[in-house]
Image: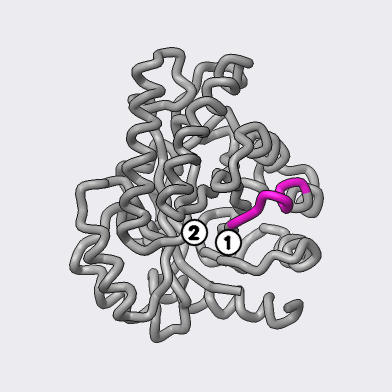
Amino acid sequence: MKFGLNLLLWTGELHDGLMPVLESLKKMGYDGVELPLFNTNLDYAAWGKRLDDLGLGRTTVTVRGEADNPISPDPAVRAKGIENTKRAIDCTHAAGATALVGPFHSALGYFTGAGPTEDEWKWGIESMRPVAEHAAQANVVLGLETVNRFECYLLNTHADTARFVREVDHPACRAMYDTFHAHIEEKNIPDAIRAVAPVLCHVHISENDRSTPGTGNVRWKENFDTLKEVGYDGWLMIEAFGMALPELVAATKIWRRMYQTEEQLAGDGLAFMKAQCAQRW
């Protein structure tokens, strides 16, 4: 198992001021970090070198919005979504990351007032196939994220995401599991994990209030027991949000601090994950 932390806790964009944070995470015992990939104009190869020097592995995370929605009825908007996700894949490859994860299957925080139509599902599949081809050429695995109904409307359950991945039908297109979204949407946590297990490539460890894992109401025993049952042995990546992301407030609704400090959350979260794994693996 590999233990990581999403840098969205601190920032939506990589900058030099993060170096002390990265050094601290390495000293705490983290194996890697998840890089926010919203600005594709940064020198990600240079960041990959910095992380290599620190001995930190990495994955990346990105999103799509209304202007580049891969399930838009406008073909030009869908094409923009494909283009932007391909650029994110190129940045992922440049950074030496192994996977690009997130809800880039559809626009985050955008709603039509109804569930996905047959056309939107079809457009989503059609948009993802060239993206998966591009990812394979870059040696990057895609981990599509199931997102709760307050943030998107295409993929709200892990069974839906597993079906979507099967219909894309490309080995570079897989799914991730997220404890926060599952806590909201799934009626049965073990069944949700079992449904996505055949295509699972990544796991986000996220508390019900997006703060320190292990301090809230997520059914952690069921989550870890079932991840062990299905044989998962990849990244456990903490996803917690702070106050540094005004660009994501509309979707994540994070506007109050729910932990003491970022360092406290990182340290306690890592200890929690390691303790849970030590009991099972």
- Magenta: main secondary structure equals helix
Q: Are marks 2 and 1 in contact (CB under 8 Å)?
A: yes
Is residue 89 rendered to the left or right of residue 149?
left
Task: Out of 96 and 156, give the one closest to the viewer.
Answer: 96
- Farthest residue to the bottom: give it: 27
Q: Which residue is rendered at x = 56% and y = 28% of the image? A: 125
Disc 2 from disc 1: Cα separation: 6 Å
Q: Which residue is rendered at x = 41% and y = 41% of the image? A: 63
Q: Which residue is rendered at x = 22% and y = 65% of the image? A: 46
Instruction: State which quarter of the image contains the C terminus.
Output: bottom right
Instruction: State which quarter of the image contains the N terminus.
Output: bottom right
Is residue 52 rendered to the left or right of residue 196?
left
Question: To which residue does mark 1 refer?
Answer: 205
Task: Out of 243 and 161, give the one closest to the viewer.
Answer: 161
Tell me if I can see residue 179 in this picture.
Answer: no
Q: Which mark is residue 239?
A: 2
Q: Amino acid at mark 2?
A: Glu
Dot 1: element:
strand
Q: Position of residue 232 (x, y in %)?
A: 69, 65
Q: Amino acid at mark 1?
A: Ile
Which range of residues does the magenta coloring cover? 195-201
Decide: is 114 above or below 157.
Answer: above
Q: Which residue is rendered at x = 26% and y = 59% of the image? A: 44
Quarter of the image for residue 45 reads bottom left
Q: Residues within 10 Å of mark 2 (few under 14, many from 20)?
A: many
